Amino acid sequence: MPYTAEINRANPTAILFLIDQSGSMAEALPSAKSKAQFLADVLNRTLANLIIRCTKGSGVWDYFDIGMLTYMAYEEKDARVENGFQGPLSSAVLNPISAIEASPLRIEERLKKFEDGAGGIVEEKVKFPVWFEPKANGGTPMCMAMYRAAEVLAEWCDAHPQSFPPIILHVTDGEPTDGDPEPIAERLKQIGTNDGPVLLSNLHICSQQAEPILFPSSELELPNDNAKRLFRMSSILPDKMLLEAQHEGYSLSSESRIFVYNADANEIVKFIAFGTIPILR
């Protein structure tokens, strides 16, 4: 049965975030934050939470190799897929979680609200490590990004044949501007380890008031061609993740895919947490 390999330091798994940084990511969510800034905050918080989950005793155990690929196009002939990490982490796309922990760009102080135990709310300063910076420029070279992800993960899978397959968390708010990414996504989903093929999840962000469509099981549930294409590009939920989602209250079937369309701020947070939590139990 696929997707049952134990995740440990000898056989880690990989999580690759594939992030759309096209110009439309500068649009504001209802919270007034841009999609790019809100997503960056969520991703930085996710990395911090993954580090906490991998901390044992006095050290961080390397259960995960983490990567961050971003894509944008300043002009038609200037499409770019870049490493979303900077500094010491920029020399490789995938880095062990201990290296992530050791190399934030900076530590910010932010205000966080807490219940005071007496029915009120207080604000306290907390440390907030930043690894990933928001950007929003130009077009959406999604095909190029999928192709680069395939290159990175084919090499990783060859080096880790006994590991739980890599997970890709692809976040976009638009349509590709460099062709049809579906054939490349299909080839990407054929890459894998002995435990199964790569899991490709897709999260579509919406800045308007629209009803999110969560883990659909048929493209007939979707409103347009772009949504249907992202659905087909997405992997079917493996049994372990399906059970986890049902436990969280989602009504799903064995054909449900790892895909959310028209995600609002709340669904962005939930989807990214869902995409990284169930594989380490």
Image: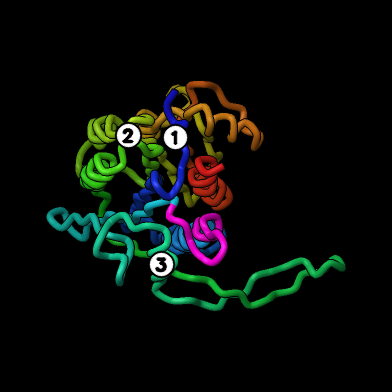
Which badge, 1 or 3, is on the more N-terminal residue?
1
**Mark 1: few, some, or many residues within 10 Å (few <14, many ≥20)?**
some
Q: Residue at x 51, y 21 (%)?
A: 254
Q: Secondary structure at mark 2?
A: strand
61 part of magenta stretch: yes
Q: CA distance from mark 1 to mark 3?
A: 29 Å
Which badge, 3 or 2, is on the more N-terminal residue?
3
Q: CA distance from mark 2 to mark 1?
A: 10 Å
**Mark 3: few, some, or many residues within 10 Å (few <14, many ≥20)?**
many
Q: CA distance from mark 3 to mark 2?
A: 28 Å
The amino acid sitting under disc 3 is Trp
**Mark 2: few, some, or many residues within 10 Å (few <14, many ≥20)?**
many
Residue that numbered label 1 is attached to:
5
The amino acid sitting under disc 2 is Thr
222 part of magenta stretch: no
The amino acid sitting under disc 1 is Ala
Specify the farthest residue to the left.
77
Instruction: Please give the label number shown on residue 131.
Output: 3
Examine the rendering and report whether any part of residue 34 can be seen.
no
Q: Residue at x 23, y 35 (%)?
A: 184
Which badge, 2 or 1, is on the more N-terminal residue?
1
Residue that numbered label 2 is attached to:
193
Q: Secondary structure at mark 3?
A: loop
Mark 3 vs mark 2: in front: 2
Residue 223 vertical position relative to residue 147 in the rendered view, above or below: above
- Image coords of residue 58 (percent x, y): 54, 67
Mark 1 vs mark 3: in front: 1
- Image coords of residue 206 (percent x, y): 47, 48
Instruction: Please give the label number shown on residue 15.
Output: none
Q: Check whether the beta carbons of the residues at disc 2 and disc 1 lie within 8 A of each other.
A: yes
Boundaries of the magenta span? 50-62
